[in-house]
Structures are given as structure tokens and as C-alpha cells.
Amino acid sequence: MTKLRRPRKTLDPQGAENIRRYLTDLYDGDFARRYFEYASTEKSTYLRVNTLRTDAETLRRRLREHYRVELEPIDAPAAAFRARDPERLLGKTFEQALGHYYMQSRSSMTPPLALDPKPGERVLDLCAAPGSKSTQIAAMMENRGMLVVNEIQADRLSTLIFSLDRMGIVNAGATHERGEWISQRYDEFFDKALVDVPCTGLGILVKQIEVSDWWTAESARKLADLQFRLALSALKTLKVGGEMVYSTCTMTVEENEAVIDKLLERYPVEAIEFELPVATAEPIDEFGGTTLHPGVRKSKRILPWEIMSEGFFVAKLRKTGSIEPSNPAPVREKDARFAPIEKLDRELAPIYDRFGMTREDFAPYRFIKTPRHLFFVSEAWEGQSLPTYRRVGVRFGQIDSGGGAILSTTAARIIGEKFRQNVVELETDEELRRYVEGGTIKRDAGEKGQLAVAYRGEVIGSAQATPGGVKSRFPKALRANDLVLPNDLANRPPAPEDAPLS
């Protein structure tokens, strides 16, 4: 979760010596040697299939056929792969823009697996940006239930919301709060919480070499206080019996086992046994001449060179009794409210009319109305006021001057399988290129009005029928200059056969 400066190409000598000394004292010289040997290797690229959008075999075939990317199965998770990407295209493909997958390290996938969220539960992701674990949790919840994702930094919050939209997440609400204060708004509310705290990043040196620019043992000690307060805040938000996963991408005891030790010693919580589908190492149970709480031994360390990914720490706790709540925060007024679908006939009339939909098609959702927009979210969301959220659910559409909703591309991709009419199938590479560039496709679009656009049977966005043809509404945010479409490589010579596994 650590936000860092632009990567450097070489280790900072003083920072590297600080790290070497710390790891040697904690383990031994051989451990430190293996750590720096791995940090100097080429990092592997992993991706997680978004099962809300596609399936593993379809994605493997498309990436192989259109982008020369080979996906190598790994033991687990089932929807995760290691990628051979000789053209370095995985971050630029059309399928990536459509949210068919998320580029995410194998280690980063383990905290949500430990949390094991279920459809219908209330789940908190306290330090959520950029969204890899949030979108994984939402997929595990099958886009059902209530997922609250929080981020304190405004720019990272924007990135988080973009990730949620790209991956088609409709059961999440985003908040912009200090994580250590969020218990002021949610007292014994959630079933589960993930606390993937900001950390000093010793586990990610292989991809973020600039960690060595500033790392000291003192930086770990200072950050540990914030990490403890974040974890405690999350515990307060849990119902009694609720479960929390605490994780970091660092290897220091101060930020890992010592935080869990303090929680176990001071509060009504217990450590839980759990399994991970990767090789793990024993936690540190003695530090600074002190034996830590026995429950610490149920946590797990992931050593980067053992799974060819990043170093991580994961612990799981269960709340066994109430904790004194924080003082409730004042409720902010916000001009947004849940609106029963029976009262949205005017707003939804264009959608019913153009796409042949009915009220019953929207049974899995609740709607939120603002003066200018309509949003929709999983029907499990509760409450009538929405004062604390930066955004809930997905923007369904803008409300036009006549009061009707103009369907957004994100919403079209989520509900497109229910459209019964006015879906335009793109027929050529040129039509696809023109659509994603925001242009007009020169063909008879029929009666003026809203359209959905499909490519190879999948609804990919919305459009407008005009006298000049089909006018694209593909979002500017997805129109990357280097976006690679499925047949763009047809006439490009392949990369060398011996390109390394990314």
C-alpha cells in the first residue's frame, strides 16, 4: 500500500546497508544474501482473471491469439496466472481496458484469500487503493453484499474508483476518511475487514527499488504506531465474532508480529488458523528479548524468492468481545438518496424503451439519485441516507433535460446481457478503432436514440444513434494513446522466441 517516488535503477548504498543489517540481525547473513539476490532479478508478472467479466480459458485464448501473451497456470489461486509477455502489452490490451483482468502480484492475492469474503456479507477494505484487493474481494463476493472501500489520499481514491469501474464492481461504496477514525462511523457493523496497511515495503524491493532510498529501522518503528491504530479502528467496526485480516508487504517485526502481539494482549480478539495456497514461513515469535503472544504463531510470512513474487505478512484475528466505541462523527449532509425503482419511471423510461428492459431486470440493484446523475449498487446496501460516501456503486447515467437517464458505458457493460434490442455489433477492426477513439461509425443507426455497442458478442459500451451513424460514448479515461486492439499485432513481427517469462 506504500506510495513511493519514481523507481531508481540501482540500490541506494546506505539504504541497502540499513536493510542488510536489519535482516542479518533478524535472521542471518545467508537470509540477507538471498534477499538481495532476489531483489536484483527480473520480476515476474502475474494477473488475476476477473471472473465477473470473463473466464480463465477465454482470457488465455484471447491473450495468446491477439497479443502473443502466454499465461502459465500456477498452483493457486485458480484464476491467477504467471505471464510470458514478450511485447510488454499486458498493461495496454483492449481486454485490460475492459476489466477482464487485473495485473496483481501473486503475494498480493493472498490477504483476500485469507479473509474469505462471501456473497451477501458486509466487508470493509480499510486502506484500499489502488484497488487490486478490493476488486478481488468484490469478485469473491460475486458482486453481492456490501463492500466499503476506504482511502485517505485523494489522488489514490480517484485511482481506486477508476479500478472499481473498470472491473465492473457494483457492490462497493468508496469513502475518503482517515482510516484510524473510520470506527467513528461504523460501530460493530461489518462481518469482515481487510487492513492492508501502509508499510515500509521491504517485501517489494524487487519492483520498487527506491525503497532503499529512505529505509531505516526507525522508519519502521514510527510507522508501526499508525498501523496499530488502523488495525484497532478496523476491529471496532467489526461485529463480535467478525474477522479481520491484517497484512503488509514488508518484513520487519515492528510492523508485523509486534502489531498483532499488541492487539492480542490488549483487546478481546483471538488469532485464527488459516491456510494460504503458497509457500509460507514461520512468523517471528521472539523479538527484542521478549516472547510474543502465542497467537502470533498463527500468522504467516511469505518470502519473495520462495514463490517468485513479493514478501508479505498475513495474520487473521477474530473479535471475541465488544471494544469501547469511538465517539460518533458528525453526519455530513449530502444531496443524494436511495430512490425506490417505482419512483424512477421517468428516469428509466429511455432504458426500458430502447433496450426492452423491465423493472424486474433491476431486481439485484438499488438506485441512488442526485440532481444530475443516477447510480446503482447491489441490493444488499442498507440505509436511506448516504452522507459518508464519496461514491456508492456505479454511475448508471446522467439525467438529461427531460429527466431521462443517458446510460453510461460502465453501466452498459454491467447490465448488457439483459438488453433485448438496439445492440449494435461492431463488424470490422476499423469500426472498433473508431468506437474506442470516441468517433462516429458510419452506418445506418436506425431511429435516433440510445444504443449499446457489442464486440464479438460482448457489450463494451454505450452510444447514440445519430443521422451520421453510431456516435461513441466510450469513456475518455479508457482511450489510452497506446491502447492495443485485438488485431493490431497481425502485421507486426513477433518478439524473440527466448523472451523471458515476465
Image: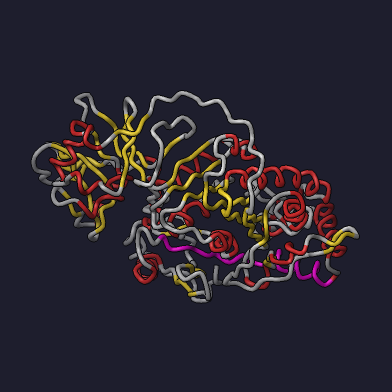
Tally of numbered discs = 0
Give x and y (percent) for residue 437: 31, 44
Residue 4 shows in the view: no
Residue shown at 45% from the left, 72% from the top? 70
Residue 261 shows in the view: yes
Instruction: Note whether 258 is above or below 331 in the view shown.
Output: below
Instruction: Note whether 324 is above or below 420 in the view shown.
Output: above
Place residue 317 in its image quadrant: bottom right
Q: Is residue 185 left or right of residue 97?
A: right
The magenta segment is 30-50
Give x and y (percent) for residue 392: 41, 39
| Membership of 490 in magenta stretch | no
Give x and y (percent) for residue 19: 81, 57
Q: Is residue 347 left or right of residue 281?
A: left
Name the colouring of the figure.
Answer: secondary structure
Residue sticking out furthest to the front: 321
Residue shown at 54% from the left, 48% from the top? 125
Residue sticking out furthest to the right: 289
Between 265 and 152, the one lying in front of the other is 265
Between 434 and 126, the one lying in front of the other is 126
Give x and y (percent) for residue 335: 39, 24
Between 262 and 320, the one lying in front of the other is 320
| Membership of 44 in magenta stretch | yes
Instruction: Note whether 475 is above or below 254 in the view shown.
Output: above
Which quadrant, please, contains the C terminus? bottom right
Instruction: Note whether 466 is above or below 361 in the view shown.
Output: above
